[in-house]
Image (spheres, helix red, strand yellow):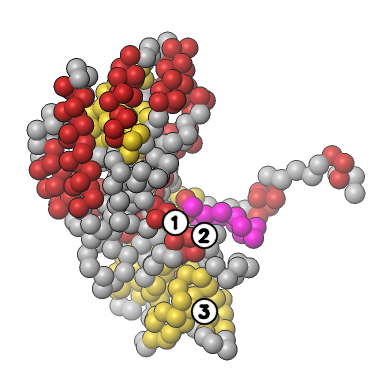
């Protein structure tokens, strides 16, 4: 459920007319809905309400805009971060350090030191070598790092191969059979406090069965660790819940279904549960609005060329991902077209031979469900300026990231000294 709706023949974001907004801010632009972000967070939190003080650590990677994080921080969300940059964003947006979890398979010493200095809640550690390094850094700083081990449960999440993370051949986590050894190591190293385990098996999960299998394995693991005399006080169940991208597709499991599974699977664990949802909080809360530059009838198919491109919204080019496409002001009728951007690659295609609202040059169209892994995966390929982001709240809106200035983009480069006198 989102707050992008047709009002009298024009697409609105809450009470803001997207046509007027696009005229004022220019295109392309990302637009986020506060009401949708808040609603999704609350629905997720309510689905977990029966648990004992769960920590919902929003996966900042999904949408790291400071205003998006701040919207969630106000509701009590923590943050799951995977770089010093994400950690600094979470802190700057008002997430208390005691609600920040640092995940990621390649944390540097510098990042570990920065996170220890900030006093974050927990490190999710991905290997034994990382334990040694973290111990070293913590001892040098006279600090203690709370550590949860990320388990690779060897479960196929049945999602796109590029975003599946829990199979044995993936780079993530510690093989489950190796975890007791690693956990004992964590418990014995100076500067570390082994607090728990966690798993994240993939993203855009549309079936709860792989999660159920993972939770069962984690439950057994917790029991084994305790039998071995090791204390386990937290379990991080990761993120991954899928969202609807395509009108007409079967609805993915709801947060309530997920919450019921969690309650059932973890009833006797006696731990603090943690969650790292990203996409399900912000995915449906954002759209990318773009203007049709031209319609190009081709030999084999017609192209709708828009002013957004793969560098602005990479998901279709990278994963073949589907985003619903809507005319912002439908003219009536439909057309079959291939929707492409101006970038010089055939992969710069948002949709192939898609039936869409009929549009003409100059019309606005919206790529729906672009709030997660949209703006944050953008690049400046083809020297295109990064797209602005606007946050709407009722009838209010604010530019929460201005369009990148081309002069500023150029100014980041330097002419090498031996070239500069020409
Ligand atoms: N926790 C960890 C350790 C993760 O790696 C991820 C996502 C999450 C939480 C959040 O997962 P979510 O709830 O959003 O599914 N760029 C891809 C998605 C990559 C997901 C990476 N990890 C896409 O556009 O589909």
Q: Which mark is on residue 392?
A: none
Q: Is residue 214 visible?
A: yes
Q: Main secondary structure of the magenta part?
A: loop
Total labels: the figure holds 3
Q: Is residue 288 left or right of residue 225?
A: right
Report if the beta carbon of the residue with label 2 is closer than 8 angstroms to ligand 1. Answer: no
Residue 403, located in which quarter of the rendered image?
A: bottom right
Residue 56, located in which quarter of the rendered image?
A: top left
The residue indicated by pointer 3 is 304
> Is residue 158 shown above or below 100?
below
Query: Residue 149's spot in the image, x, y percent?
Result: 32, 30
Query: What span is in magenta?
Result: 377-389
Instruction: Kindly give the residue lying farthest to the front in the view shown.
Output: 177
The residue indicated by pointer 1 is 374
Residue 298 inside the magenta-drawn segment = no
Residue 385 inside the magenta-drawn segment = yes
Q: Which mark is on residue 312?
A: 2
Q: Nearer the viewer, residue 347 or 121?
A: 347
Give the residue drawn at x 40%, y 45%.
169
Report how far apart the C-alphas of labels 2 and 3 lie in the structure.
17 Å
Q: Secondary structure at mark 3?
A: strand
Q: Is residue 193 visible?
A: no
Report how far apart the C-alphas of labels 1 and 3 lie in the structure.
21 Å
Residue contact at pointers 1 and 2, CB within 8 angstroms: yes
Report how far apart the C-alphas of labels 1 and 2 lie in the structure.
7 Å
Q: Secondary structure at mark 1?
A: loop
Query: Residue 273's spot in the image, x, y percent?
Result: 20, 34
């Amino acid at each position: 459920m989102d707050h992008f709706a047709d009002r009298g023949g024009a697409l609105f974001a809450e009470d803001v007319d997207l046509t007027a907004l696009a005229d004022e801010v220019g295109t392309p632009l990302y637009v986020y809905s506060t009401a949708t972000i808040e609603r999704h967070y609350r629905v997720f939190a309510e689905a977990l309400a029966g648990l004992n003080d769960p920590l919902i650590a929003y996966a900042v990677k999904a949408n790291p805009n400071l205003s998006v994080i701040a919207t969630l921080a106000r509701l009590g969300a923590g943050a799951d971060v995977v770089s010093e940059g994400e950690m600094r964003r979470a802190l700057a947006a008002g997430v208390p350090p005691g609600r920040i979890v640092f995940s990621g398979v390649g944390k540097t010493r510098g990042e570990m030191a920065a996170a220890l200095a900030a006093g974050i809640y927990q490190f999710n550690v991905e290997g034994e070598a990382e334990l040694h390094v973290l111990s070293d850094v913590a001892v040098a700083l006279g600090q203690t790092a709370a550590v949860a081990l990320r388990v690779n449960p060897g479960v196929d999440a049945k999602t796109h191969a590029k975003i599946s993370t829990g199979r044995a051949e993936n780079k993530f986590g510690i093989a489950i059979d190796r975890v007791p050894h690693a956990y004992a190591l964590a418990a014995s190293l100076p500067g570390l406090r082994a607090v728990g385990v966690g798993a994240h098996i993939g993203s855009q999960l549309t079936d709860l069965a792989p999660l159920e299998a993972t939770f069962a394995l984690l439950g057994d693991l917790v029991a084994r660790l305790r039998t071995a005399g090791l204390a386990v006080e937290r379990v991080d169940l990761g993120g991954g819940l899928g969202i609807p991208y395509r009108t007409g597709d079967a609805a993915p499991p709801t947060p309530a279904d997920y919450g019921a599974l969690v309650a059932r699977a973890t009833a006797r664990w006696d731990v603090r549960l943690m969650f790292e949802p990203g996409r399900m909080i912000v995915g449906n809360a954002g759209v990318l609005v773009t203007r049709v530059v031209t319609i190009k009838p081709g030999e084999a198919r017609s192209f709708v060329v828009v002013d957004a491109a793969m560098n602005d919204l990479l998901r279709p080019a990278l994963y073949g991902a589907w985003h619903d496409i809507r005319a912002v002001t439908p003219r009536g009728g439909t057309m079959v077209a291939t929707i492409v951007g101006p970038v010089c690659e055939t992969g710069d295609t948002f949709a192939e031979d898609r039936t869409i609202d009929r549009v003409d040059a100059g019309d606005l169209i919206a790529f729906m469900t672009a709030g997660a892994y949209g703006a944050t995966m953008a690049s400046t390929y083809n020297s295109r300026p990064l797209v602005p982001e606007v946050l709407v709240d009722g009838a209010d809106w604010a530019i929460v990231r201005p369009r990148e200035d081309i002069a500023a983009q150029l100014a980041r480069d330097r002419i090498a000294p031996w070239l500069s006198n020409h």
